[in-house]
Image: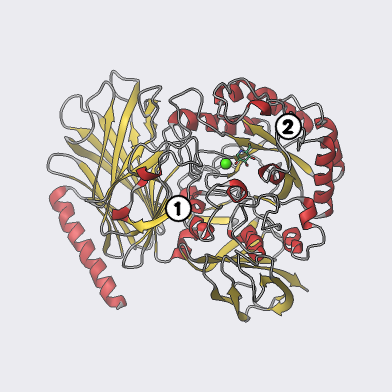
Amino acid sequence: MKFKILDLFLCFLIILTVCAKQNATTSVTSPSGNILVEFQLKSDGTPFYLVGHKGQAVIDTSTMGFEFKDQSPMVNGFQVIGTVTAPHRETWEMPWGEQRLVNNFYNELVVKLQEIKTPKRQLNIYFRAHDDGIGFRYEFPHQKGTDSLIILDENTQFKLTHDHMVWWCPGDWDSYEHLYNTTKFSEIDARTMNGGTLLNFSYIPENAVNTPVTMRTDDGLYLSFHEAELLDYAGITLKVDPATLTMTSELVGSERLGYKVKRPLPFKTPWRTIQINETAKDLIISKLLVNLNEPNKIGDISWFKPKRYNGIWWEMHINKSTWDMASGYHGATTTNAKKYIDFAAANNITGVLVEGWNTGWEHWVGFDDREGVFDFVTPYPDYDLAEVVRYANERGVEMIMHHETSAAPRTYEQQLEKAYSLMKDLGIHAVKTGYVGKIIPNGEHHHGQWMVQHYQKVFETAAKYQIAVNVHEPIMDTGIRRTYPNAISREGLRGQEFNAWSADGGNPPEHLSIVAYTRMLAGPIDFTPGVFDISLPSKPNNQVNSTLAQQLALYVVIYSPIQMACDLPENYEGQPAFQFIRDVGVDWEQTVVLNGEIGDFVTIAREEKGTGNWFVGSITDENKREIEINFNFLQAGGNYLAKIYQDGPNAHYRNNPLDIQIEEMTVTKETVKSFILAPGGGLAISIMRVK
Ligand code: NOJ
Ligand code: CA
């Protein structure tokens, strides 16, 4: 069998070489030779590319082109005026992350194109073939007589070879907070989700999907489409044509400005990326996106320490208190903040977030005139900011600032320096930002170029003040945490909060088994796990659709360098299962995905940086299943004490979520053990080195 695949691949290469002679084919293979990208021009000079994996076509003839304001489109009429190929082998270190060392191995091909006829514009296309996928990007060099370009549309095609199974969210220009759909490509129908009742800021103009969008082919290959290094450009959605099995880039636009992108020349677009993996597990391990970003530009970031945090947050979402003070049950009081700080200090939690601390919340959701409402320096009278910070510092806890912009980014930008100076004076190194609502001014969208510029400005300004940023209602991560390691985490999905208040019964049990292979490929997620009071007594129509053991497993399964223990301190008191949260690592030497399938289950083991301790998390969808864990990831000769937190025999996410069994056993590299996960269940294991 192996022989056959190899033969096929050789044939493919021979065909390509023959083509190269006839049609100026240019191609590049990944370091292992498994992935091949081929570039060609049609007879009318239209650029197109193809992608293969071990001799099998993955992307069929897919054209590339642009439409501009005040210039004729770039569609055809090109000739190749030069090509450059170069190998690249580099290993770099993540300051924090899923693993410490990252191999960035690829071969690059640059194709230089020029129009045959006047105005003879040039376009360069960079292709990078990695062993876990490909990236390509466009470069617009200097052009005579023009100093900038206005792009009305980028038409990059991705022509699939079959009607794959797809895990997708609608191509929403404002929100990624949708449930995932699982359908054949030909059955994608995104516009039906427009104006959903949950999301007053949804805008889905096309039958398109948001990225990352992940697929499984009938031959068992896994593909995920996204973009890398999104800076000063519009975010991408992918328009779906079921008839031709083709996706075409549909950039997020601006009704206010009437275009998609405006950039001074010369410039490069973000990378268009396709992860190509042989197993679902490999999707999660891929470092393609970060590798396609530039190295750290902000220098030393040792002032940011990955951490567990708690805070005044969940209590608002379950209606126990409010962000605003006028309600009479304000959450962010000095006394309440001290309660959370005391709990943090006593439980190995090093960060505390306080939402609703600043004036303005009386005029938040439901108001159109939100410009100028929030300032980011004035606490409510019942919240003594300086005293809270002093109290926290004294107990070894760092406060995390909160800036809800209410989607009025101009108000926020006007106050950035002032707000961050205050944080610097107080010695606060992290902020959670938020952009709830329709963007002001009208006609702009969360994922358009104007907002991409805003989010970028926030990261850059924050870096100057040694501030790390966790963005809610963000632009999707595209691996820029490599360049800006103060971009620590983001929401960008239906998070835990939906379990507290969504009218559709919260996130279904399969949600996170899909997220692990879709949203999580983009980068760290601030999901805020750790609800122990799962049935939510104060919310009769809501509950969290998982078992307690699954809530623990999420600290390992979902990656983020900041992980919230989101429940109220009183719900953790006296709970033996809370020990896992006290122990679990937040920064990793290495990550191993042990098993999993998209939408069904996933098991991940991570080695904590600096201690040699390991943590395992496993989650399942609504189906009970048995998983086998082979502990061969442990160091040879090492002795470890494992503490196992698993679903009890009667556990079920719906009616018996708290049934949990906790036991200890010694494990070594040779241990192999099976576990039962309950419906909506999970498994968490801490594995501590013993001398
Ligand atoms: C939405 C965020 O996702 C949530 O975490 C936050 O509590 C509210 N906005 C208020 O800012
Ligand atoms: Ca949100």
Neighbour class for label 1 at 10 Å: few (<14), some, many (≥20)?
many
The answer to which quarter of the image holds residue 603 is: bottom right
Q: How many marks?
A: 2
Q: CA distance from mark 1 to mark 2?
A: 36 Å
Q: Earlier in the sequence, mark 1 or mark 2?
A: 1
The N terminus lies in which quarter of the figure? Answer: bottom left
Q: Which residue was labeled with disc 2?
A: 327
**What is the residue that sits farthest to the front in this orientation?**
540
Q: Nearer the viewer, residue 260 or 188?
A: 188
Tell me: residue 19, above or below residue 454: below
The mark closer to the camera, 1 or 2, is 2
The C terminus lies in which quarter of the figure? Answer: bottom right
Tell me: residue 532, above or below residue 568: below
Confirm or reject: label 1 Cβ below 8 Å from ligand 2: no
The answer to which quarter of the image holds residue 387 is: top right
**What is the residue that sits farthest to the top in this orientation?**
145
Residue flagged by tag 1: what amino acid is it? Tyr
Snapshot colouring: secondary structure
Residue flagged by tag 2: what amino acid is it? Ser
How far from the left and from the top, in percent, is residue 104?
47, 53
Task: Residue at 60%, 46% (x, y): give it.
Answer: 501
Q: Which residue was labeled with disc 1?
A: 180
Q: Judge whether residue 419 can be spotted in this image.
A: yes
Q: Quadrant of ligand 1?
A: top right
How far from the left and from the top, in percent, is residue 508?
53, 57
How far from the left and from the top, in percent, is residue 639?
72, 77
473 relative position to 319: left or right: left
Q: Which of the numbered marks, if any, corresponds to residue 218?
A: none
